[in-house]
Amino acid sequence: MKRVRGISIDDRRVFTMNEVRTDSSIRSFDRLADAARWFLPIAIALALAGCAGAGGGKAGSSSRTGVGGVICSPAEGVYVYVYRKGADPYGPADVILPAPTFADGTYSVELPPGEYTLVARRRSNQDSAGPLSAGDQRSDPVDVTVAAGGIARSNLVLNVKEDSGLRSFVPPKEWSTIIAGTVKDADGKPLAGARVHVYTYVQMSERPKYVSERTGPDGRYAVFLPKGGTYYLAARDRFGGPPRIGDLYGRFDEGSINPMGVVVRDGEKREGIDISVFRVW
């Protein structure tokens, strides 16, 4: 059992990218069936060839279904992201490998039969999620079909050219509903470098609908929303994935055990929604 000063994080939870699902709140995952086995490693039976054949491939014979391949240039420290076919390959992924590639560049992930899009990314800060920064590398999106009873092959080549001209999400001008406040540390001091994640369900188990920019030295944040409603907020210093030991994490709960909903009307700016974060241990 990991604890966050007043917030329990049960080791039995099943994690996906930007999701924390408890045993009682796991819903059927119609996008990628059998959620409990997403991240089981697949033994790659044959030695994988070089990157000359980068791109999607046909599935070989196997009792399991999924995709595997090699990351090239560089091979080590790369995360592979899996999207449903037709989803935005530059947004949050449906599945993310739980660990980066090693020196041999091989990767594998078990998936149900279907059509997917893969993207490989290597961040200089070694995070598995979050906006790309100048100097980070990524592959082009590659479509792959996973057939029943087979492992599809898809090698991915990172772009050597540095990503440049990256900019943060700018909400449309018509998004005039705002939740704002201050993120504070365990001593009540403003915390820099945190983001506020906004959810629409009290379980806070789905991917966040909206995410703020990182806080500055004053700890202030503001989240622009398309409409009013009831929202649930969490603040953390790392973007994406479940809270890990050493992370700073906290929810807006006003001292209660459960998260507190923030009610905001259309066009209203709700201020003073302060969130305290604590070290996960």
Image: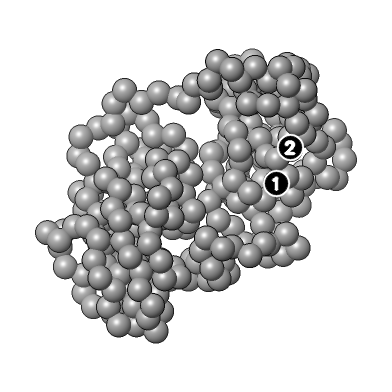
Instruction: Name the residue at 76% across, 52% down.
Output: 8
Numbered label tally: 2
Pinpoint residue 72: horizontal percent, then vertical percent.
Answer: 21, 53
Can residue 65 be seen at all in this image of the molecule? yes
Residue placed most toward the observer, 82 or 196: 82
* Label 1: few (<14), some (14–19) or many (≥20) C-alpha neighbours in 10 Å: many
Q: Amino acid at mark 1?
A: Met
Asked where in the image residue 124 lies, by quadrant, the reply is: top left
- Taking 148 as reference, is 256 above or below it? above
- Residue 163's quadrant in the figure? top left
Q: Which residue is mark 2?
A: 232
Pointer 1 residue: 204
**Disc 2, SS:** strand
Q: Is residue 235 above or below residue 63?
A: above
Gap in Å between the C-alphas at discs 2 and 1? 7 Å
Q: Is residue 278 left or right of residue 88?
A: right
Residue at image position (72%, 64%) is 23
Note whether 152 is above or below 225 in the view shown: below
Where is residue 35 shown, x and y percent of the image?
56, 66
Q: Could you tell me which quadrant the N terminus lies in?
A: bottom right
Q: Whole-percent x and y of residue 82?
A: 41, 55
- What amino acid is found at the position of numbered circle 2 in the picture? Tyr
* Residue appearing at x 39%, y 45% in the figure: 89
Point out residue 85 in the picture as x, y percentages from the top left corner. Answer: 39, 54
2 and 1 marks in contact (CB < 8 Å):
yes
Q: Residue 125 got which mark?
A: none
| Label 2 vs 1, first from the N-terminus | 1
Question: Circle 1 — which element?
Answer: loop
Quadrant in the picture for residue 146: bottom left
* Left or right of 145, for residue 35: right
Front one among 144 and 272: 144
